[in-house]
């Protein structure tokens, strides 16, 4: 009577035991294996109906179970759950490898692919092509020892990427800054002090405890007037996974990169980047390098100017990395008469959430209704039923605040993807500032942008309207997946939108006009510097994944060589060892996608600006031509269908005030 193997509409979090996962996964794999064998043994000639469609749903139960397991491991993990994940990963990888390298199955898929008519249904055509390509890209053509190596490597990689994330989370949780002298709090906003006091009390300590979670680290590095304390917390944060000891990620990275490189070589590619990029919008490594180089040349003068402006605020002979945020905030206040902390009372989490919900109501006609009867995995989680008139569109799970069991960052994922008449169950996870001193959770403006970003992903999933789950929602090419989320961030700077929800949590007073003006004017504050940072991260990703052989260089050395540094990097500080996107997630050789998608989002929002940011016709076309289509068509075609032209970086450079065109 394992609950995970029973039929249920809503994830039964209140009934699942950690002991349920392994036996359920074992049985779900056996069921999927039987279904695969039935496809192979079918005596009829291969068709879409007897090969492609049943293959699409062969592992449906397995996917449903693992979606719960892996999502909970990221946002509500335990030692036992982490052990379960490490134990089941090899079996899951072996199953996936069995399917991907099944020659008889591939031969049936190939027969369907090779005889597929040119005028067939576009969505079915995409599914046929994607299914065929997945076999090719996962080693079906390999023979003998190469075939064994590919399978063995895939199994080890699956475990290593999980271990990477577990190490990073453990290292983050292990470090704290415990202060007992009130003088050490000089410069910190009261909200950060109160939160640190609550953290100390929770740990049964006197004074104040600061952690490396974003709501604690961010205010400290930005406002603390004690340079030596900023240095301590910066070095700890910038060294996550690079401290040595049990949670060090250097050996894990070396092995991940070596295995990915070997996989690419086995499939006939020079580098892992070459392997990945041929299936992306950017198409090739030379084209990616050209994109990164062109954008770097465009933003480098602005980044240098940003640094000089920050230096002008300091009496220090030299600016170190732990100084930058502190003096950049002072510069922002001087230039725009705006204090980031002064904005927070106008952005209570409840108001921001309602403002976002109302925006989607105006754009897409949908409503969000809280449903406290839906089982949740943690008391912090809220669930909303999403509707379009009388039509149920899906469920939205919101998990907003940090805890020791949750990895850092913010993300959207699914417990169930949309397909046919089945509606999705979408999860948005963030690490926002907690309520303190009886106040509601008050968000920094960058947290408002993050919420908008992740809800853009959520809309991509909730508004999906396709037949096949593997093509639904965010199942698009990786360098397109960030566009719907990034385009939504633009509304944060529109007065017409801010006026609908930005109100003081005590008085109900709307955000004063001078703060609205300052906020809009400050949008490009440090834009060149921040863009260069993203390009550096993308180039770091490329540097690791263009290695062709083992290297004696450490992760820190590879990263420091790849980046364009305007401030000398510090020894022991390394983004790579906590770079979950590329070593613990699906962005390997794809981190550039954030900048690539930014070009797309700036171009798309230029149309909203021209037509009106609440224009129902434009919004409906965006929904129908892009959001609802998932991965059923190539993203370049979806973009062109909506915009009427191919992507152009002019809109992005104009938004960043780097061109007059």
Image: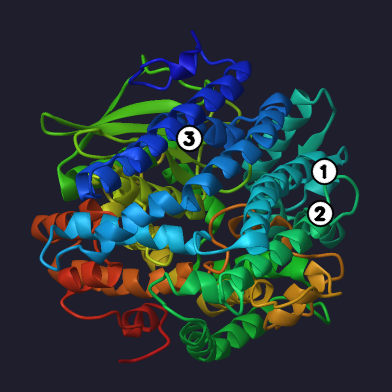
Choose top left, top right, bottom left or bottom right for residue 370.
Answer: top left
Secondary element type, mark 3: helix
Compared to 65, does 274 lie above or below?
below
Give 288 or 108, whichever is nearer the viewer: 108
Give 213 or 498, whichever is nearer the viewer: 213
Sequence order check, earlier mark of 3 and 2? 3
Q: Which residue is mark 2?
A: 236
Task: List x then y, in percent, for residue 521.
Answer: 41, 71
Choose top left, top right, bottom left or bottom right for residue 227.
Answer: bottom right
Using the rendered image of the protein, determine whether residue 652 is visible from the camera's viewpoint: yes
Compared to 634, does 291 lie above or below?
below
Task: List x then y, in percent, for residue 358.
Answer: 24, 42
> Neighbour class for label 3 at 10 Å: few (<14), some, many (≥20)?
some
Secondary element type, mark 1: loop
Marks 3 and 2, how far apart at CA: 32 Å
> Neighbour class for label 1 at 10 Å: few (<14), some, many (≥20)?
some
Give 578 or 81, whichever is nearer the viewer: 81
The quarter of the rendered structure image containing the C terminus is bottom left
Left or right of 378, for residue 564:
right
Compared to 510, does 335 lie above or below?
below
Secondary element type, mark 2: helix
Sequence order check, earlier mark of 1 and 2? 1
Q: Which residue is mark 3?
A: 67
Compared to 271, does 156 lie above or below?
above
Task: List x then y, in percent, for residue 32.
Answer: 43, 33
| Mark sitting on residue 175 | 1
Marks 1 and 2, how far apart at CA: 7 Å
Q: Residue at x 68, y 61 (%)?
A: 145
Q: Contact, CB < 8 Å: mark 1 with mark 2?
A: yes
> Neighbour class for label 2 at 10 Å: few (<14), some, many (≥20)?
many
| Mark sitting on residue 239 | none
Using the rendered image of the protein, determine whether residue 426 is visible from the camera's viewpoint: no
């Amino acid at each position: 009577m394992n609950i995970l193997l029973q039929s249920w509409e809503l994830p039964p979090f209140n009934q699942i035991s950690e002991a349920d996962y392994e036996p359920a996964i074992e049985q779900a794999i056996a069921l999927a294996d039987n279904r695969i064998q039935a496809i192979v043994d079918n005596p009829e000639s291969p068709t879409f109906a007897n090969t492609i469609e049943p293959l699409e749903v062969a592992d449906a139960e397995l996917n449903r179970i693992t979606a719960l397991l892996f999502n909970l491991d990221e946002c509500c993990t335990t030692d036992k759950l982490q052990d379960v994940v490490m134990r089941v990963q090899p079996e899951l990888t072996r199953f996936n490898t069995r399917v991907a390298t099944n020659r008889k199955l591939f031969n049936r898929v190939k027969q369907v692919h090779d005889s597929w008519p040119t005028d067939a249904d576009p969505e079915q055509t995409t599914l046929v092509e994607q299914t065929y390509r997945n076999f090719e890209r996962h080693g079906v053509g390999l023979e003998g020892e190469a075939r064994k190596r590919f399978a063995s490597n895939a199994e080890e990689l699956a475990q290593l990427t999980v271990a990477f994330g577990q190490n990073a989370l453990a290292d983050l949780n292990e470090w704290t800054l415990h202060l007992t002298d009130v003088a050490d709090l000089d410069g910190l906003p009261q909200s950060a002090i109160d939160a640190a006091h609550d953290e100390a009390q929770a740990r049964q300590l006197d004074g104040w405890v600061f952690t490396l979670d974003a709501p604690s680290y961010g205010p400290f590095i930005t406002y603390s007037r004690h340079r030596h304390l900023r240095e301590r917390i910066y070095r700890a944060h910038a060294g996550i996974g690079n401290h040595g000891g049990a949670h060090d990620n250097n050996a894990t990275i070396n092995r991940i990169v070596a295995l990915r490189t070997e996989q690419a070589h086995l499939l006939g590619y020079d580098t892992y980047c070459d392997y990945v990029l041929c299936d992306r919008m950017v198409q090739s490594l030379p084209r990616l390098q050209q994109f990164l180089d062109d954008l770097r040349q465009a933003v480098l003068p602005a980044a240098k100017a940003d640094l000089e402006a920050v230096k002008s605020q300091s009496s220090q002979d030299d600016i170190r990395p732990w100084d930058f945020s502190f003096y950049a905030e002072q510069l922002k206040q001087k230039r725009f008469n705006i204090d980031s902390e002064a904005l927070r009372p106008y952005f209570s989490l409840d108001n921001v959430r309602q403002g976002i919900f109302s925006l989607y109501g105006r754009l897409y006609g949908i409503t969000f209704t809280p449903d406290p009867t839906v089982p949740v995995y943690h008391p912090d989680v809220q669930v909303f039923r999403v509707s379009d008139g009388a039509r149920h569109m899906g469920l939205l799970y919101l998990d907003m605040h940090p805890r020791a069991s949750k990895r850092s960052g913010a993300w959207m994922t699914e417990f169930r993807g949309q397909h046919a008449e089945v509606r999705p169950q979408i999860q948005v996870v963030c690490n926002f500032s907690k309520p303190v001193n009886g106040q509601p959770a008050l968000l920094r403006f960058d947290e408002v942008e993050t919420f908008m970003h992740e809800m853009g992903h959520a809309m991509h999933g909730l508004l999906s309207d396709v037949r096949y789950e593997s093509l639904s929602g965010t199942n698009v090419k990786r360098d397109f997946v960030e566009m719907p989320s990034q385009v939504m961030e633009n509304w944060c700077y529109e007065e017409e939108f801010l006026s609908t929800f930005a109100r003081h949590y005590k008085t109900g007073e709307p955000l004063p006009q001078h703060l609205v003006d300052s906020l809009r004017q400050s949008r490009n504050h440090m834009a060149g510097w921040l863009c260069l940072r993203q390009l550096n991260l993308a180039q770091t990703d490329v540097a690791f994944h263009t290695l062709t052989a083992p290297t004696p260089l450490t992760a820190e050395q590879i990263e420091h060589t790849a980046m364009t540094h305007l401030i000398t990097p510090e020894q022991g500080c390394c983004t790579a060892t906590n770079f979950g996107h590329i070593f613990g997630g699906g962005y390997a050789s794809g981190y550039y996608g954030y900048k690539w998608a930014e070009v797309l989002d700036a171009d798309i929002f230029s149309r909203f600006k021209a037509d009106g940011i609440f224009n129902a016709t434009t919004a409906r076309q965006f929904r129908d031509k892009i959001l609802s289509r998932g991965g059923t068509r190539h993203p370049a075609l979806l973009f062109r269908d909506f915009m009427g032209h191919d992507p152009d970086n002019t809109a992005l450079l104009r938004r960043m005030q780097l061109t007059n065109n």
